[in-house]
Amino acid sequence: MDLTDLRNRLTPGSPAGDPAQEGDFGLGDKVARQPGTRLINADGTFNVTRSGQSLFAPYKNLVEMSWPRFIGLTVLVYMVCNLTFAVGFYLIGPEQLSGIDGWSPFDKFLGCFYFSVQTFTTVGYGVIAPDSVAANALAALLALFGWVALALVTGLFFARFSRPTRMILFSEKAIVAPFRDGMQSLQFRIVNKRDTSLINVQARVVLTWLEETERGLNRKFHPLELEREFVPLFPLNWTIVHPITAESPMHGWTRDDYCRRYSELLVAVDAYDQTFAQQVHINKSYTYAEMGWNVRFRPMYEEREHLTELFIDRISSTDPCEEE
């Protein structure tokens, strides 16, 4: 079995021998046929909104929300819970808590709140203590609630810290630049923006565009053959190159052709992070408006004495080159 037959077997529903229907990232050719609609957003998420059936998934939302929102929500829940129990202690009678006798009504409420905080966090200074069956029962319930809440928050913090993050930085634009032997190439760069150790980095690139047919606009997909699809180690940057040969779907395209077809470059990068012992997957796309033409990437590293220095801030730096 040759490579074409194997690829057709791995792409159910694709016309045999039609590479323009392969590698659609699971999106299909019936989506995003409105000019200017991108398939993958700039942050790597799919430009898809779900509706029709809501799913209550608090764990997923708490793990994926931003850190400021998560910290703010944690503090808010902490305050609301303790204020609620403080109201409970105040309603059963502040006099049932020893240590706050002779205080003003407002100070007694503050005493109830601080006792709630001390019981919730199991600090228990001992200055204020329950002095009745009702107060002891409510304090026992509060201690159980605080114990469960502490376990939940600890698990959420661990899940957020251990969650795979976007460690690979992409160049702001993909470029069409001279390659070799008078050939043009499509290029973009990636770099590991952290000091973690990434290995077995693999890239997959698919070109998609809108094509006019008898039934209107139809979306086409075509996987691009890369000069190199895999690097075992990733200490420096990696310029991912697609040589625009006669077999390339971009062969003969001009800048106007790329724009007129509302083309989009879909990128998927997989790597293994040795530091956190986890697989990392990142999506990226470049639309026709995020392409550079007739420029070259500026080198990102320089040789020092017995050392190579990598300048991450140069990942998008380019220099003009003469048109050929």
Image (tube, grey):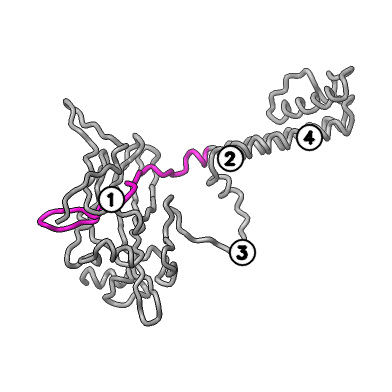
SS at mark 1 in the image? strand
* Residue 147 position by quadrant: top right
Name the kind of residue labelled 1 in the image. Phe
Q: Earlier in the sequence, mark 1 or mark 2?
A: 2
SS at mark 3 in the image? loop
Residue 315 showing in the rendered view: yes
Q: Which residue is mark 4?
A: 85
Name the kind of residue labelled 2 in the image. Phe
Which of 128 and 82 lies nearest the eye of the viewer? 82
Whether the magenta-drawn stretch holds residue 222 is answered as no
Q: Which residues are magenta?
A: 158-187
Q: Nearer the viewer, mark 4 or mark 3?
A: 3
Q: Which residue is mark 3?
A: 53
Q: Position of residue 51 (x, y in %)?
A: 58, 64
Which of 305 and 149 lies nearest the eye of the viewer? 305
Q: Which residue is mark 1?
A: 188
Q: Earlier in the sequence, mark 1 or mark 3?
A: 3
Quarter of the rendering occupied by the N terminus: bottom left
Q: CA distance from mark 4 to mark 3?
A: 36 Å
